[in-house]
Image: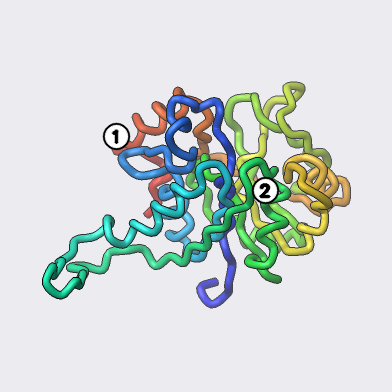
Amino acid sequence: MADERIPVVILCGGVGTRLAEQTEVRPKPLVEIGGRPILWHIMKHYSRYGFNEFVLALGHKGDQIKRYFLDYHAVGQDMTISLKEGRVLPLNNNVEPWKVHLVDTGEGTLTGGRLRLLQPLIGGSTFMLTYGDGVGNVRLDDLLAFHRSRGGLATLTAVRPPARFGALEFDGDRIRHFKEKSTLHEGWINGGFFVVDPAALQYIKSDVMWEHAPMESLAGDGQLFAYRHEDFWQCMDTLRDLRYLESLWDAGRAPWKTW
């Protein structure tokens, strides 16, 4: 896996209206847990499994995310500054081995539209895809192996949180029906942490929600599979969610801390 290029696309463009207390001043992926943005926590988890190339789809307040990574090297480590020579020398080399592509995909672009715009950077390889506001201890090596063994164009990670998200109906591991934000079902929902083959992007016909027509069509064609994750997953939709994640981190009991 280390020799194969599998970029990780992270959708970072949403407004995060239900977390307005935090997102009025910063984009949702930069809202902090334990003094670090949730985006950093997500990237650390992927990096733990050897995925170190990231493609960030920016939108709302995306300039702040660019600035975060521009300053990352300088702020994230000890250094010696020679004022006379104008040189900065690192005192350690603890910075993550990440390559981060930061792409402005528009303020109001929908998730499917953002993916279409990223296609040139993604290239012709299988890629990972997730949201910039959810953490979990998903075994990413098992997820990738599962995706390849099923032979579909896309695999999502199915999780079991509160019943206010999209519902999935199964036929074995194949997803028979996909419906986002349904209140008619309870049980398994879309938790992100996708593995996607490039051909799946052909299902995105315009600036649409990835979770609507494209995924519904993939499911209808038998090309969408579910990797069931029975362990920890939590999105950061509300202030209550944020406080819950912070409490786990502060107590030293953060299940998503896999590094």
Let me know if residue 214 appears in the view. Answer: yes
136, above or below 5, in the image: above
The residue depicted at 32 percent of the width and 39 percent of the height is: 34
Residue at the location (51% across, 35% down)? 234
Is 36 above or below relative to 44? above
Task: Tell me the quarter of the image containing the C terminus.
Answer: bottom left
What kind of residue is marked 1? Asp
Which residue: 28% across, 60% down?
74
Q: Position of residue 134 (x, y in %)?
A: 52, 40
- Disc nearer the start of the sequence (2/1): 2
Q: Quadrant of residue 38?
A: top left
In whole angstroms, how far apart are the C-alphas of marks 2 and 1?
Answer: 30 Å
Instruction: Give the side of residue 158 with respect to residue 64, left or right.
Output: right
Q: Position of residue 203 (x, y in %)?
A: 82, 54
Colour approach in the figure: rainbow
- Tell me: 217 left or right of 51: right
The label number, if any, that marks residue 44 in the structure image: none
Q: Residue at x 44, y 25 (%)?
A: 21
Q: Residues within 10 Å of mark 1 (few under 14, many from 20)?
A: few
Residue placed farthest to the front in the image?
84
Assign a secondary structure to mark 2: strand
Report the residue marked by disc 1: 250
Q: Which quadrant of the structure image shows residue 230?
A: top right
Residue 159, horizontal then vertical, whole percent = 61, 38
Q: Which residue is mark 2?
A: 156
Count of residue discs: 2
Q: Quadrant of the N terminus?
A: bottom right
Query: Does residue 142 appear in the picture of this structure?
Result: no
Asked which secondary structure carries label 1, the reply is helix
Residue toward you, 220 or 87: 87
Query: How many residues crowd mark 2 within 10 Å: few (<14), some (14–19), many (20+)?
Result: many
Amino acid type of the residue that numbered disc 2 sits on in the rendered structure: Leu
